[in-house]
Amino acid sequence: MALQIRQTLRQIQQLVMTPQLQQAIKLLQYNHQEIADVLEQELKENPLLEVAREDEPLTDQQPDERNDLASLEDLVREPEPKNLEILDVDWQNYVETYGGDNSRINRDPNAPSPIDNLSKSTESLFHYLLAQLQLSHIEDQDRRIALELIGNVDENGYLDIEMEEVAKTLDVKLNQVKRVLKLVQEFDPPGVAARDLKECLLIQAGRLDPENPGAVRIIKEAFDLVQEGKLDKIARKLKMSHDEVQAAFKVISKLEPKPGRPYDESEVRYVVPDIYVIRVGNDYSVILNDDGLPRLKISPFYQQQLHNSASHSVAKDYIQDKMRGAMWLIKSIHQRQRTIYKVAKSIIKFQREFFDKGIDFLKPLVLKDVAYDVDMHESTISRVTSNKYMHTPRGIFELKFFFNSGLPHGVDSIASESVKNHISKIIKGENPQRPTSDKEIVDLLARHKIRIARRTVAKYRELMGIPPSSQRRKKF
């Protein structure tokens, strides 16, 4: 059979991911900070976009077209110019009349000081050690060695290089490197530049005031037993009384295993809620966080140029292209806010008992339930709840927090987060000298009609970062 080229006509249905649709999907899954960055970038790239003033009046609209943000028509409308009667201002008494909030006399005495709003810079461990080196009596070649050692101290305060490598790099004797290391280990914080945990604790124990020879001896001669917490074996091995070992163990437990911890340079990132839930009477109101999000509108200058017959056709094509992009962005932002609002209201509807009574009343919930309630696809709900936070009277929670699998609880079911809370309460109320085992936790949960396996308790305990009972046991 010979191969032939033929034309055939077929009718198929498929989803085409246009650039505009891709943009709308991305905007939906962005959180508050990310969407603010996107809008800032769009304002730089699209000349037709402008920021509307906050005092622009809102026009009359149907309730079903309203949202917490301004409607699309209000966003693109040019504001009416206002006549500012600046001559009516009492300039002689301006500070007393208009500046009361900034006056020192009228300031709330319980309000935090403005200096608290300043950013705090933390000195790094390297610069702290370098400053001590510059003030020390270490000179010449010893200073070169000390600088090499300080440069290889990690963020936890431990030396992250072998002595032989330092000696080879600087072409010096190994004994000289060891001698300089002893000088660096006298720097603050105590235990810095140690090569392992034993040496770190030993340096700190040697600098205690008052001295504790028992703690130093225990670390030197029975450090492996210290890690296991076997006080009886330590007492027998070192021929010390149990009270002496217990007193020394208390001192050792207070030493810092990571001397570089106070100089951690990692920046603390605060959560910015995307949604605020406020209780009003017996109901809850949802307010979308639009703080920092600019209200977008179309530039009136370019609108005039688009309708100006004198404008060049190439310029008009450019303006029309940017106009479509700007309008699609504004509609996408508007739709994003409406979708988040609907999902938040649905979550409150399903988890009403949590908002009223607390985490013990959190119900099992899956994305499919909310998707059916708001008449959207499950993937849309997943994007909305991804990396977004809700500020509630119970605290700040990620939206994913409200979606939990269910576990048997009598004739009903209970959310997994509620079970974790029960486990956390049991462990917090346990006897430190006889901590509750996973099997005992299973029995205690069964009294509350929560049927759960021991391995599930172990899994939840590990997810919460709680060690097993053998490691929670206190010796004194």
Image (cartoon, rainbow, N blue to C red):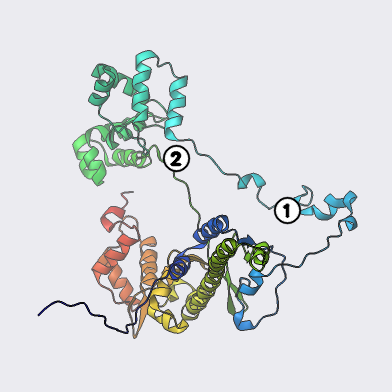
The relative height of residue 64 versus residue 429 in the rendered view (above or below) is: below
Which amino acid type corresponds to the residue marked 1 in the rendered image? Asp
Residue under label 2: 262
Which amino acid type corresponds to the residue marked 2 in the rendered image? Pro
Q: In the rendered view of the protein, which quadrant contains the N terminus?
A: bottom left
Q: Residue furthest left?
A: 1
Residue 322, horizontal then vertical, whole percent: 55, 64
Tell whether 391 sits left or right of 437. Answer: right
Tell whether 126 sits left or right of 239. Answer: right
Residue 440, horizontal then vertical, whole percent: 28, 67
The one nearer the camera, 216 or 364, is 364
User: Which numbered disc covers residue 143?
Assistant: none
The relative height of residue 371 versus residue 261 in the rendered view (above or below) is: below
The relative height of residue 401 versus residue 225 in the rendered view (above or below) is: below
**Could you tell me how far apart the alpha carbons at marks 1 and 2 are, in whole angstroms?**
33 Å
**Residue 245, quarter of picture:** top left
Residue at the (68%, 70%) spot, across then down: 77
N-term-proximal mark, 1 vs 2: 1
Residue at the (47%, 77%) spot, across then down: 351
Mark 2 neighbour class, 10 Å CA radius: few under 14, some 14 to 19, many 20 or more: some
User: Which numbered disc covers residue 108?
Assistant: 1
Residue 226 appears anywhere in the view: yes
| Badge 1 element | loop
Residue 365 appears anywhere in the view: no
Residue 338, horizontal then vertical, whole percent: 54, 75
The one nearer the camera, 158 or 43, is 43
Residue 302, horizontal then vertical, whole percent: 64, 63
